[in-house]
Every structure is written in C-alpha cells, then in structure tokens.
Image (cartoon, helix red, strand yellow):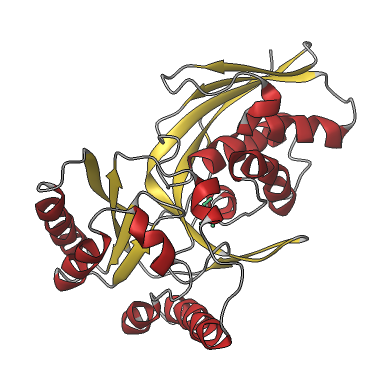
Amino acid sequence: MKEVTVKAPGTVANVVCGFDILGFALGEPLDTMTVRVTDTPGVTIINKDNYDLPTDAQKNVAGVALLAVLDAIKGDIKGFEIESTKVIKPGSGIGSSAASAAAAVVAANHLLGNRFTNAQLVDLAMYGEEIASGSRHADNIAPCIYGGFTLVRSHDPVDIIPIAAPPLHVTVLHPQIEIKTSEARGILKKKVAMKDAITQWANVAGLIAGLMQRDYDLISRSLTDVIVEPMRSTLIPQFKELKQASLDAGALGGGISGSGPSIFMLSRDEATANKVKQAIQSIYDKVDIDYHVYVTTISDQGVRIKT
Ligand code: HSE
C-alpha cells in the first residue's frame, strides 16, 4: 500500500494588522497524519486522537481537501485513507483546521509524484477552511505549507509571497475557552472607515518592511490593529492587561492569534520571550480559566514528510 506520514505545524494568522493576509509557521505544536492510496472510492478517515472530529469526508477539513484533490486528478486513483493524530487542539486559534487540510494535500501530492505546485495545494486546502469557518482564506494554510512568514497577496487566484523574517521568538497563550472562527468573523463590522484603512495598510506595509529589513523597532511599531482587534479582543479575558504586561516585559508586540482564543507575542530573543511568558502567567494565574503558555519560534519549515 502506498502511504506517507507528514507533520504539520500550528500557525499564527493575521499577525495583528494583516487580517486574512499574513501568517507564520510555529516551531510547535505539530500534528501527524498518514495518508494512503486506497481502492475504496472517496476519502476514509480514521481519527487516532480524542477530539472526536467528523469522519464523514464531506464534513472533515482534511476530507474535503482530499475530495478536491481526487476531483482535480480525475479518476487517476480511487481514494485516500487518512489516519490523523492531532496535537493542535481544534478551536485554539493556531490553525488547527489549516494544519489538517494542509497535511492532507501535501501528503497526497507526495503520493501523486508532486504534480501540484504549492500555490495549487493552498487552493485545494482552502476547501477545508471553507467548511471550518464559512470563508476561503489562506493566512493559516499558506505558512503551514510554505513554512516561515507568508503574505497572501491574493487567494483567488492564489498568490503567496514568502517574507524573509529575522529570528523571532513567540510566546503563545492558549486560554482553554472556545471561540468559533465563524462567530469571531461574524462580529466584525462589514465596513471600515477610510482613516482606519489608511492606518491599517500603513502598518501592514511597515511590518513587511520591518521584517525584510530586519528592523525590530519598525516591526514593533507596526504591530497595531485598529480594525479587528478592537472588536475581537473583548472575547479574550484580560486581553488588554496581557498585552501591556507583555510589552512591559520586553515583547515587540503581538495580539490575537488568528480568530483566538490564543494570543501570541513576538520577542527578539528567547530570554525575553520567557519573561513575557512569566508576565502572562502572573496574570492568568489569577483568572479562573485553565491555560497553556509556551515559547517557540517562527519555523522555516511547513508541512514536512516524515522519513
Ligand atoms: N484570518 C482568519 C480570521 C484566521 O481571523 O478569521 C482564522 O481562520
């Protein structure tokens, strides 16, 4: 039986000012998925974790992505079987659904002799995001497939720009509450004031320039969101305090990871990222919510084949 096992990283989408267009891959956590070519038509799903995700391929993010692959290859093979072991908790805000969909299409592509480009894989994996959140967006999928920091210049047609970033350490807080992406998208205003749009695209441009010029001060100044964060931050207990304490501890900046509830803070070095972790802990120890906080890096590696 032809099979391959891949590992897929968690990702941080939006990166404060770049709603639906910016994202980066995390060093951890990583999901594991084995994909096999089968003679059973369609996509068979076996979940090896306790998240109780759907096994009906039409309702499963990896399932719909592989159905799209089968559709694209027009009968060359009959079906795929997925064995999924998730570590990235669904609904945590660090790209759990994107990791599943990206893992599935990268693994399938490997089994098919790499006939799709990375941009085509992003397009196929977006079918997963569509059922997970009700909208096609690629800001988690792109870094999950490409690794590193990515800009989604366009998702239709797919145009992904890898952005060279200097070393950055990431402190991630995952409060154990659930925020559905569809709901976090639903609370957003449909219209943006021109003055806010100007501030926002200035910050997006500043952040990209800061990353490419390795200018940490410019990165820090640009990590500002006047459009999405004011609405979504109300969903995360102690958000303002967490952000201020992180900045006081030396973080360059940060905010909501994707649609939350996780938040992320960027630091220049690991020692600062650990101080940020302690600052976050000292706030969340007083809050009646279980949480997990850890330090990792931006990883150059996206979905990788396990050898
Ligand atoms: N850009 C997306 C959002 C990421 O913030 O809704 C979560 O899927």
In the figure, 51 relative to 206: above or below?
above
- The percent coordinates of residue 195 (x first, y second) are 52, 88
- The percent coordinates of residue 160 (x first, y second) are 65, 62
Quadrant containing the N terminus is top right
Q: Residue at x 52, y 24 (%)?
A: 53
In the figure, 12 relative to 32: above or below?
below
Q: Is residue 146 left or right of residue 170?
A: right
Tell me if residue 297 can be seen: no
The image quadrant of residue 30 is top left
The image quadrant of residue 71 is top right
In the figure, 146 relative to 266: above or below?
above
Q: Residue at x 54, y 39 (%)?
A: 97
- The percent coordinates of residue 246 (x first, y second) are 20, 65
In the figure, 277 relative to 129: above or below?
below
Q: Residue at x 50, y 60 (%)?
A: 23
Q: Is residue 111 left or right of residue 215?
A: right
The image quadrant of residue 241 is bottom left
- The percent coordinates of residue 95 (x first, y second) are 48, 45
